[in-house]
Amino acid sequence: MIQPGTLTNLTSLERLYLNHNQISIVQADTFKNLPRLAHLNLNNNKITTFKAGTLTNLPRLERLYLDRNKIKMIELQDLNLYSNYITNIPSKAFESLQNLQNLDLRENKISAILPSAFVFLPSLEI
């Protein structure tokens, strides 16, 4: 576990590589006050849950790597994909985001949405 406040004074940090560690818990305020962080790599750890608020206050985050962990659920409530180049929404695209309440897909290039793209989203507000 990374203790909250450990990274507080690294305000110029742009890339953070914490891959191949034994991290199992990521607290909500772990990455607080990292305004320039653009790349965050948490690959190959033992993270099981990604709590809501974990990535709050990371305005420049462009890349997040979470592969090869043990994540079962993401407690994400708001997902903003506004003004990107998304062209289609595949079947069950958001199925692991069961707490998702708000999804913003405005100003994309969507030409196809498969019928079951939004299944398993009981909290999504339309």
Image (spheres, rainbow, N blue to C red):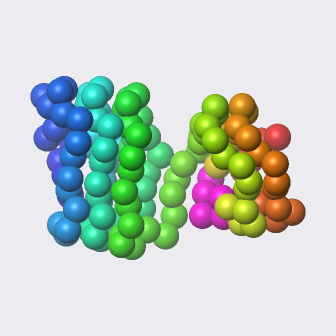
Horizontally, residue 17 falls left or right of residue 119, namely left
Instruction: Give the mark count.
Output: 0
Front residue of 44/46: it is 44
Q: Residue shown at 71%/49% (left/top)? A: 87
Residue extending farthest right:
115
* Secondary structure mostly seen in the magenta stretch: loop
Examine the structure image and report whether residue 60 is included in the region drawn in magenta: no
| Up-down relation of residue 101 to residue 45 (above or below) | above
Front residue of 70/68: it is 68
Quarter placement of the C terminus: top right
Horizontally, residue 27 falls left or right of residue 74, namely left
Q: Where is residue 63 in the image (x, y as percent from the top left)?
A: 39, 46
Res. 105 in view = yes
Res. 102 in view = no
Examine the structure image and report whether residue 95 is included in the region drawn in magenta: yes
Q: Position of residue 78 (x, y in %)?
A: 60, 40
Quarter placement of the N terminus: bottom left
Q: Residue shown at 23%/42% (left/top)? A: 15
The answer to which quarter of the image holds residue 96 is bottom right
Q: Position of residue 77 (x, y in %)?
A: 59, 44
Horizontally, residue 51 falls left or right of residue 85, namely left
Front residue of 93/5: it is 93
Q: Residue shown at 28%/70% (left/top)? A: 44
Q: Residue shown at 20%/68% (left/top)? A: 20
Horizontally, residue 104 falls left or right of residue 31, namely right
| Up-down relation of residue 4 to residue 92 (above or below) | above
Q: Give the range drawn in magenta.
A: 94-99
